[in-house]
Image: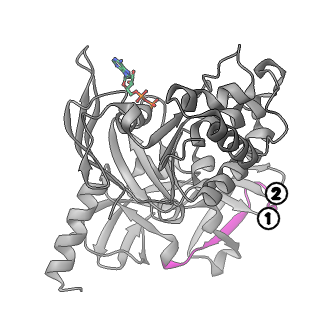
Amino acid sequence: MALIKLKHINKQYDDGFVALKNINLKIESGKFYSLLGPSGSGKSTILRIIAGFSHPSQGQVLFDGQDITDLDPSKRQINTVFQNYALFPHLNVFDNVAFGLKIKKMPLRKIKPAVKEALKMVRLSGFANREISELSGGQQQRVAIARAIVNQPKVLLLDESLSALDKRLRKEMQFELRAIQKKLGITFIFVTHDQEEALSMSDQIFVLNNGEIQQSGTPVDIYDEPINDFVARFIGDSNILPGRMIKDYEVEFANQRFKCADAGMRPNEKVEIVIRPEDLDITEPDQGKLVVTAQTQLFLGDHFEIKALDTDENEWLIHSTNACSLNQRLGLYFDPEDIHVMRKHESQADFDARLESYEEESNVQ
Ligand code: ADP
């Protein structure tokens, strides 16, 4: 059973702005989830509704099957690590981590081992007496996590928690957060606008835009099979071209027809196709499925980024370990599975409905 379920959640703020539209999602226990989307897409609003700091205008929040929509945040088995950590500067590390337990009047003989264990978990054993001002950004981040896990919640919410850290530290904390989540075995829901961060850390990602879930799935699903042009553009570099579905498993773009792995659309339906730059192999022109002419080339340290035009004037982005020369004619080879066919602006709900009706029609079990 899902640990948390959001059912038909809408959120309209007092000024009339609709920040969330019909959000449905399921969170299971023991997994790492990311809410990924551009700034203003509604990620923090979802987090606040799960935590109980914000009330949905419509819809239900379920926890272990119980309706907690109106339950006070302090009564939820859910804690939040805020973006600015919200540590108390006048308290030392021990007192920051112990704060919530003291408020709950836990006896000190129980608080001490709990704080010790939490600090050990975030690799800050021996820091209990340090002042907050004596800690680096990464250490403050860990104190905030220790404080949030000390009372053993079932779910930890992390709101853009790594955004204040520099790039190297951020990478380290990504590994560390994932390791902490695995060790604790609880659910983490992580908010980020950084697609690489979400792809590298998560078991499952919800991609949001304009208050709607565009797609949910594993990082591989989302990267390899973006559901629409928004997701394709947001998650990494893409070649996106207009095309036409000839019939199941055959698509036309750049004035040619290609075998593909997609089915279930109307014959001749207009679509968009996505091919990732790293899925394109450069060949001799007569061995490629398409012929392009190189326009620019940039060396990016571990690969070349080549821009090229096909005969239909479509621009192609190619990642290659081999250099080419400008105006060189290049063959492009790709497999049918590398072609991802999308309907413009299709959402996860539209996609699910389409798949269901396709499966019913073709009796696919
Ligand atoms: P994200 O976390 O993805 O950046 P938020 O959930 O913080 O997005 O905000 C979603 C949208 O709701 C934004 O357009 C934001 O301006 C708006 N919003 C957030 N809080 C309020 C509020 N209290 N009143 C009105 N609009 C708000």
Q: Position of residue 90 (x, y in %)?
A: 71, 13
Disc 2 residue lies near ligand 1 with CB under 8 A: no
Q: Which residue is mark 1?
A: 321
Q: Position of residue 269 (x, y in %)?
A: 24, 64
Whether residue 211 sits left or right of residue 144 in the image: it is left
Q: Position of residue 59 (x, y in %)?
A: 19, 40
Whether residue 54 sits left or right of residue 10 in the image: it is right
The residue drawn where x is 31% and y is 76% is: 263
Q: Which residue is mark 2?
A: 302
Q: Toward which corner of the image does residue 27 lie, by quadrant?
A: bottom left
As for residue 124 lying within the magenta part, the answer is: no
> In the rendered structure, which amino acid carries the disc numbered 2?
Asp
Instruction: Report the span colored magenta.
Output: 323-336
Q: Quadrant of the C terminus?
A: bottom left
Q: Are marks 2 and 1 in contact (CB under 8 Å)?
A: yes
The residue drawn where x is 53% and y is 50% is: 235
Q: Nearer the viewer, mark 2 or mark 1?
A: 2
Whether residue 249 sits left or right of residue 295 in the image: it is left
The residue drawn where x is 64% and y is 33% is: 108
